[in-house]
Amino acid sequence: MTMGPGGDDARLSRTLAHAAGLALLDVRTGHAEGKELKDKGDARAQAVLSSLLDYHRPGDAVLSEEAADSAARLTAGRVWIIDPLDGTREFSERPRTDWAVHVAFWEAGELAEGAIALPARDVTYGTDDPPVVPARAEGPIRLAVSRSRPPAFVTQVAEELGAELVPMGSAGVKCASVWLGEADAYLHAGGQFEWDSAAPVAVARAAGLHTSRIDGSPLVYNRPDPKLPDLLVCRTEFADTILAAVARHTPAEVS
Ligand SMILES: Nc1ncnc2c1ncn2[C@@H]1O[C@H](COP(=O)(O)O)[C@@H](OP(=O)(O)O)[C@H]1O
Ligand SMILES: [Mg+2]
């Protein structure tokens, strides 16, 4: 852990996510629509995160959805993995609130800290103060799933489990729905990148949730190829049941 300007790494993750979130809210008050609004949001949030990281942690490497990748991160001991705007589509659809800023900190082989801001809901979750997962009410398993491109195999798994699908945008918001008790699991396959899940997975782990690939193997970050196409984040009591159901359905998205 590094203490420096901006506090320790967990505290800095929160500060960065919150600051980029304020900038995104400002962008959203403008007149831009559609692709122009998405592009402005991506660029502004990237600029805020990049300048704050340059100032607070000039020696650290960065992997961002919105910046050129550098091989330097593969030999670095400290790497920030950021998605300046996750749920870009939903960001451009005012007044939707299911979009997020992801800031994760990776150190020596493992996700160490992270924060995710949901600016339109005026809340930031972080490993510095992990969410407390509420007790579960009775009822069918609820699976958070992409609202715009739900993987076909998730529908098959849901049918087998008698589960309900809860569609929403943003990987981060779907993970948050699990620690908030609004869903029991976020199941995804078919494509994603490390920045889509790093910060939400760091927070989910700190909250005591199960996090893995859909074959049950560990999620590994800061690899040479940042593709990380599938994941399961869920309440621990459902991990075995969901992984077993997934194993009975070969996802076309990953076959
Ligand atoms: N099949 C796929 N291939 C690549 N990225 C995907 C994907 N499905 C989802 N994602 C990414 O995961 C994030 C959440 O998607 P969704 O809301 O559909 O669940 C989005 O990130 P961005 O908004 O940062 O691009 C989206 O681009
Ligand atoms: Mg994303």
Image: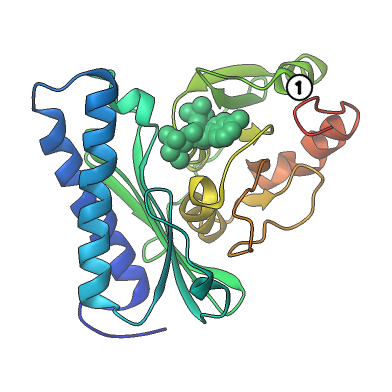
Above or below for 5 versus 193: below
Q: Amino acid at mark 1?
A: Phe
Q: Is residue 173 visible?
A: no
- In the rendered image, residue 214, in percent from the top left (x then y), is placed at 76, 42
User: Eyeballing the image, is 122 above or below 190?
Assistant: below
Label 1 CB sits under 8 Å from any ligand 1 atom? no
Q: Residue at x 10, y 37 (%)?
A: 26
Task: Work out which quarter of the rendered image holds the N terminus and state it.
Answer: bottom left
Q: In this image, 85 relative to 218: left or right?
A: left
Instruction: Using the rendered view, name the quadrant where residue 247 is placed.
Output: top right
Q: Residue 60 versus residue 172: which sits nearer the camera?
A: 60
Q: Is residue 37 above or below residue 122?
A: above
Few, some or many residues within 10 Å of mark 1 (<14, 14–19, 20+): many
Above or below 15: residue 253: above
At horizontal 67% and vertical 43% (from top left) the residue drawn is 231
Q: Residue at x 30, y 78 (%)?
A: 57
Rendered-image quadrant of the C terminus: top right
**Residue ID for mark 1:** 153
Ligand 2 sits in which quadrant? Answer: top left
